[in-house]
Image (cartoon, rainbow, N blue to C red):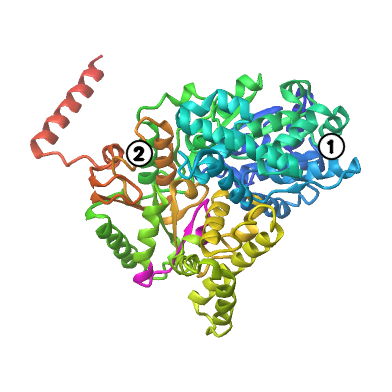
Amino acid sequence: MNDSAGNAAADRGEALPADDGLDAAQRAAVRAGAAALLVVAGPGSGKTRVLTQRIAWRAATESMQPQRAMAVTFTRRAATELRSRLRQLDVDDMGPVGTFHSIALAQVRQYDTDHGRAERKILPSRAALSGELSEHLQRSFGARPPVTVATALREIDWAKASDLSVAEYRDGPARRRLGPSAGEVVAELFRHFERTKSRRRLLDFDDLLAECTRLMRSDEHFAAARRWLHRHFFVDEFQDLNRLQWNLLQEWIGGAEAVHSGAADICAVGDADQAIYGWNGADSRYITEFERYFDGAQIVRLELNYRSHPSLVTAAQAVVNADSEPVATDAGRTAQSPARPHETGPAPTVTAFDDAAAEAAGIARWIADRHVGGVRWDSFGVLARTNAQLSDIAAVLDARGIPCRLSGQRSPFLQLPATRQVLERLRTTGDQFSTAVSDMRAEVQDAEPGDGSKLALAQVLDLADAYLTEMSRTSGRTFSRSGPTGAGFATWVSLLSASDRELTADLFDSDRFDLRDGAVTLATFHAAKGLQWHHVVIAGVEDGLVPLRSDDPEERRLFYVAVSRAARTLHVTWARHRSGRGSAAGPRSPSPWLAQIAAATTEPPPLSPDDAASRLAAARAALESSRER
């Protein structure tokens, strides 16, 4: 959108009603005329509302045709919510709304169809080749290689997200990240993995982005058609872009030159203070240096937090601002203040326990004591840095009869106590796995209605059927020497769930596997991103866990994300001693960030009568002096 188009849209927008329920900054973001717009939106600032209202406003003012727009999100859940809100705003003819991967998949398949090519097979997860990779690993490096297949797959994930070839990875970051020996092993597995896919004409999840980018760069007719069809781009969670996604976005847009010339426009929404995926290849510089990438870009900051009361907003700001650069120096950050400054609410509370077991029991009591007067279980969230901590807390909640569910990037269903019991039963069946699955099916048929453990059994057996189907399909090729086993199923499930990919969501969708309504949610700091609860407990806030790595600035942002999930009450716990499960064993001390929260949120002590009198006298003297002048 060029300047004249932007001014015309603004003029038409003056005729729209002002009582749109937006604050001044939100309205400025919705009605901005810039071709490159960055909306910096902190927690609870209404970013999704602003994004959908901007799309609707531009459609209403005819500054864009919605069918020529593209809205990109990072999760299917966010895409579904975005579509729903747009329908409520009468935007029914919107162009594609989805994740990078789903949109790229549609475009690659359309390209193949247009060119008469057979549809390429999509590898639902790298775990589908885990057996072959394991055999290659042992064949090449012996029975005890320096890395596991799971570690190698995670590292390949990172390399693919960083848009690195095998050679670029091997000659660059491999040694730095893993050391010479392990780096060389992962590079070899990476090479073998890529060759195997090529030989079988397979694309994995991240290949979709790379392939779509390659087609845009190599076929000028395909690129021209895409850019003509989609000219208006809306990108959520911009701080989480990795290099692979950035490269594809640039090809879709046509580069900064297309924005500058008016051939395309972009609205990016994000918050650099919530950039927590650097470990997985995300690069927050795309948001912090937005003005460098798009010269003349407009930045609008949403500084009001509508979620949390003032004490909690202050606590969150104390975490993220300490030891940080001033907000004014960073395009992707914003200093938040409460939208309701006169609202009262309790300051965060902190409780220390002797050990992790006592901590878990204390968390259960804290939740049970507040589950009164119509307060729902699902208004509580328990957050921790690691999944291991959450599993222990879930077991205590379950034992006390408090319904709970684990929400996370890596298959929350698999962490439920009932599910883990079933998986352990199957793991020990050895080469009688198929028979055991058949026997367990009979148990499901005999179960009483509403039996949660049998429901978990039925859903694990669905996974077992998928495993058996995969084994049958790859028979004689990948698993020819072993056949289905209990241990093989356990490895398959672990690796498949660890991929956490959209194309396997039908197996691991948390809504599908949510066994109870109105349950307490347990989540890691990473998994809590984008969620909120009235009452939040943050567990294990100890030095060595929070932060887990003291030299990583992303750890502070993670804790900021956790603290800012709370709307009404925030309770923080830590243990004086912790075992080695999920962290180093030994005595613990509280996280240094707790002192920063306390300093920011603790009311100053009342003045003594003498201090009050002296301060009053000084104030009167200053007032008299000013009057004399």
Relative depth, front residue between 413 and 593 = 413
**Mark 1 belongs to which amino acid?**
Leu
Residue 10 in percent (x, y) is at 73, 32
Does the magenta run of residues contain 411?
Answer: yes
Indicate whether 436 appears above or below 192: below
Measured Cα–Cα span from mark 1 to mark 2: 46 Å
Can you tell which quarter of the image residue 73 is in? top right
Q: Is residue 386 left or right of residue 464?
A: left
Residue 156 in percent (x, y) is at 57, 38
The residue lying furthest to the top in this view is 629
Residue 99: tell me if it is visible.
Answer: no
Looking at the rendered image, the quarter that the C terminus falls into is: top left
Crowd around label 1: few <14 · some 14–19 · many ≥20 (10 Å): some
Residue 399 in percent (x, y) is at 35, 71
Indicate whether 73 appears above or below 620: below
Q: Could you tell me if the residues under marks 1 and 2 are in contact, i.e. CB atoms within 8 Å?
A: no
Residue 229, disc? 1
Residue 396 in percent (x, y) is at 34, 65
- Badge 2 marks a residue whose secondary structure is loop
State how many labels appear: 2
> At x 27% / y 51%, what residue is drawn?
579
Q: The magenta stretch spans which residues?
A: 398-413
Can you tell which quarter of the image residue 374 is in? bottom left
The residue lying furthest to the left in this view is 610
**Mark 2 belongs to which amino acid?**
Pro
- Badge 1 marks a residue whose secondary structure is helix
**Which residue is tagged 2?**
547
